[in-house]
Image (cartoon, coloured by chain):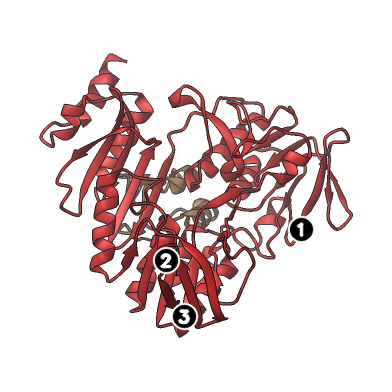
Amino acid sequence: MDGIVILGAGQAGIQLASTLREMSYGGPIHMVGDEPVAPYQRPPLSKAFLSGATPEAALFMQEPDFFAKHDIRFMPSTEAQSVDRELKQVNLKSGDRLPYDHLVFATGARNRALPCAPDARPGVISLRTLEDSKMLAKGLEAAANIVIIGAGFLGLEAATVAAAAGRDVRVIEAGPRPLGRAVTEPVSEVVRRCHHEQGVRFDFDETVVALHGKGVHDHALETRSGERIKADLVLVSVGVTPNTELAAAAGLPVDNGIVVNEVLLTEDPAISAIGDCAAFPFAADGGRMVRVESVQNAVDQARCVAERLVGKPAAYDQVPTFWSDQAGLRLQMAGLAMAGDRAVVRGDPTSKAFSVFCYRGDRLVAVESVSRPPDYMLGRRLLRAGISPTPGQAADSSVDLKALLAASKTVA
Amino acid sequence: MRVHLKQHLCVGAGLCVVSSPEVFDQRDEDGVVIFVPGQEHPDPKYHDAVRGAARKCPALAIEIEEEG
């Protein structure tokens, strides 16, 4: 028996390995990771770890004796060279071979580079790993100011930490608003307002076309509109690319992620893909192919595949959820909205605590809550149950939406 | 073992409830972590699972104080 080989030791990979053992899977488990350290939490890298509030030791997701205790062969600092589907084995760069009964891609994603500065240079940081976060924290100690390119979750969480530490923070975003690809306009607006109150300066509809300067503490960013912005430190946070090359080279279909079916299998019945690297059919939306970057997605997809591998196959049908802490706001989102969906606000959007219910036609497709966790929980349950309040009910804070859930349970 | 919950950090991911349902629960209203009544000092047979839950919490909202 060759057992299960997991490529990737991030949130999805470690969840799969540990769930397999929890479910009494008795075969060999190999988990291949390209980083030198054991699996760790990435969310705090742009929040509590970056700010210094959380020590490094708290980031590791397992007790030090976990792998030995559960007979999981964790291979750090190890990279796969290729996958031989005929022989059912992974060829490692070291020259070693790992045969498998089942292979799972949990290879995650990597940060995109700035098109005008594709190569690494000192003082220009891209935040993905523990090492990146340490480098950014160290850079911030010595910097008076930082320019952050890209106003997504990661960039704005880092902006929050930098501003709180008294640094001068400027954010350059190609789109017209912060978190523009992730949330609706009312949420973007409160996010912009709260960052602004903390001293963060934004440039929207602006891109960096060239990076000049001598390096650390001497950067000059040339923008499309012709401005030259000086910076001590630069953070590039312009999104990610899924790590699909190995799968593609093995002849598996890849389209914004490794393509899998409703049970997260690739077209090869001996290979699955989970987490940031997987493009899967989104059951709640007619099977449209999506790729989701979140802890919830990594964890739930790992559990789904673990169950299948111990003989309990089921379609993946979880509601995607996300969260972000920034500028004093707690953002919690459930579901997947798209451009063109209608945003119905519940509460006062000029306050710092309200929610947005997103509709496609009459159907509720996502809920975004700004510092209103009960609305988030409710939204998650409504989406899970497939219940859509009318937009009128959603907009009216006096309507008790919980009653709709209770009513549906009674009927069921 | 004494467990401390930092409820202001909790984002309601629910991973703790999956790994230790005997010790952790989520408040119905907002999903924030709470103790199953009486489990601030969990039974020793749950200690490993509780340590795992603390390490897996993506919001780092669970702290463990090892006693004795």
- Dot 1: what SS? loop
Residue A53 can be seen, yes or no: no
Residue A158: which numbered mark, if any? Answer: 2
For chain B, the rendered hue is brown
Residue at 37% of width from left, 55% of height from top?
A: A205
Mark pair 2, 3: CA separation:
15 Å
CA distance for labels 2 and 1: 29 Å
Among numbered discs 3 and 1, the one appearing first in the sequence: 1
Amino acid type, callout 2: Ala
The answer to whether residue A34 is left or right of residue A375 is: right
The secondary structure type at the circle numbered 2 is: helix
Above-or-below relation of A223 to A404: below
Residue A394 locus on image (x, y percent)? 20, 32
Which of marks 3 and 2 precedes in the sequence?
A: 2
On the question of residue A175 being in view, the answer is: yes
Q: Give the label on residue A232, or none.
A: 3
